[in-house]
């Protein structure tokens, strides 16, 4: 931050006309700043709970007898998902939900790189993250793609792939079933809803694949795609998402995962 402040001062002094180029407006509060968010808004973005499952990112309460910050949750132990790990930049709550909603439903595509930068920062910060061989954005069914005009997961994945110099595959994985919205479906019903929804034609033998998506709700859709990638030989599958829903009641979760 000091560097950017100093840099700003240097440019204000030497090149007043460039000041406007380096100054932005905070995407949330419109305050003048040099990055996507002003310091105050950045500090108040909802992060991931400190104690969480490294596979599915479910939060759990801290217990003194179990001081480790990351331990596999009971659900992932009992029924391991087809993916190995999940990284999310943020928790899906205000104002992150509003930003993602604006991206998806009001086609504000300039929000995609802003959200992607938060994910990239998180991926670079975490020592546990290993660079995958390939990024696959969560596919949209062709009919939904036609309605929306873009796939928000592709918009985000494009930024991540470019910044981290990772190959991205856009053509080999398709969503072959146009699944109905998952509103108010419990985990088992969500799983059934997306079963056989994907088809992948790429040989992924021994490869580490990162699936990029905007939101992870229960993980049922990511699980369904990961199952398909496993069939094609993927050795390791990581989910890289902008935001993870944390919920008390599965019945109360919003329909965000399509
Ligand atoms: Zn702000
Ligand atoms: Zn878990």
Image: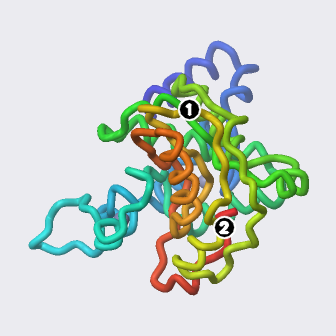
> Residue at 64% of width from left, 76% of height from top?
254
Determine whether the residue tagged by mark 1 lies in a helix, strand or loop. Answer: loop
Q: Is residue 198 above or below residue 75?
A: above
Measured as percent of width and height from the top left, residue 237 is found at 45, 44
> Residue at 64% of width from left, 13% of height from top?
14
- Rounded to the nearest angstrom, the CA distance separating label 2 from label 1 is 30 Å
The quadrant of the picture occupied by the N terminus is top left
When asked about the image quadrant of residue 75, the answer is bottom left
Packing grade of label 2 (10 A; few <14, some 14-19, many >=20) is: some
221 displayed left or right of 127? right
Of marks 2 and 1, which one's residue comes earlier in the chain? 1
Residue most toward the left? 65
When asked about the image quadrant of residue 137, the answer is top right
The residue closer to the viewer here, 8 or 34, is 34
Q: Do we see residue 153 in this rendering? A: yes
The residue closer to the viewer here, 63 or 84, is 84
Per the image, the residue denoted by label 1 is 203
Q: Is residue 143 above or below residue 191?
A: above
Q: How many marks?
A: 2
> Residue at 42% of width from left, 60% of height from top?
81
Q: Which mark is residue 256?
A: 2
> Residue at 45% of width from left, 46% of height from top?
238
């Amino acid at each position: 931050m000091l560097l950017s402040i100093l840099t700003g001062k240097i440019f204000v002094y030497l090149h007043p006309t460039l000041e406007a180029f380096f100054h932005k407006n905070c995407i949330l509060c419109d305050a003048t700043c040099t990055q996507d968010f002003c310091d105050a808004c950045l500090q108040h973005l909802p992060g991931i709970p400190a104690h969480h499952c490294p596979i599915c990112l479910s939060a759990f309460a801290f217990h003194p007898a179990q001081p480790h910050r990351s331990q596999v949750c009971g659900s992932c132990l009992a029924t391991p998902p087809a993916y190995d790990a999940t990284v999310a930049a943020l928790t899906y709550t205000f104002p992150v939900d509003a930003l993602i909603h604006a991206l998806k439903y009001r086609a504000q595509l300039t929000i995609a790189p802003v959200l992607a930068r938060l994910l990239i920062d998180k991926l670079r910060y975490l020592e546990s993250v290993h660079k995958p061989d390939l990024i696959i954005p969560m596919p949209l069914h062709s009919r939904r793609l036609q309605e929306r005009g873009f796939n928000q997961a592709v918009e985000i994945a494009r930024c991540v792939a470019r910044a981290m110099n990772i190959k991205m595959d856009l053509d080999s994985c398709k969503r072959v079933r146009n699944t109905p919205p998952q509103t108010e479906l419990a985990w088992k019903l969500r799983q059934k809803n997306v079963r056989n929804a994907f088809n992948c034609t790429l040989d992924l033998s021994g490869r580490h694949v990162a699936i990029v998506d905007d939101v992870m709700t229960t993980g049922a859709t990511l699980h369904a795609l990961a199952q398909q990638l496993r069939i094609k030989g993927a050795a390791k599958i990581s989910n890289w998402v902008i935001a993870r829903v944390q919920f008390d009641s599965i019945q109360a979760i919003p329909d965000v995962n399509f």
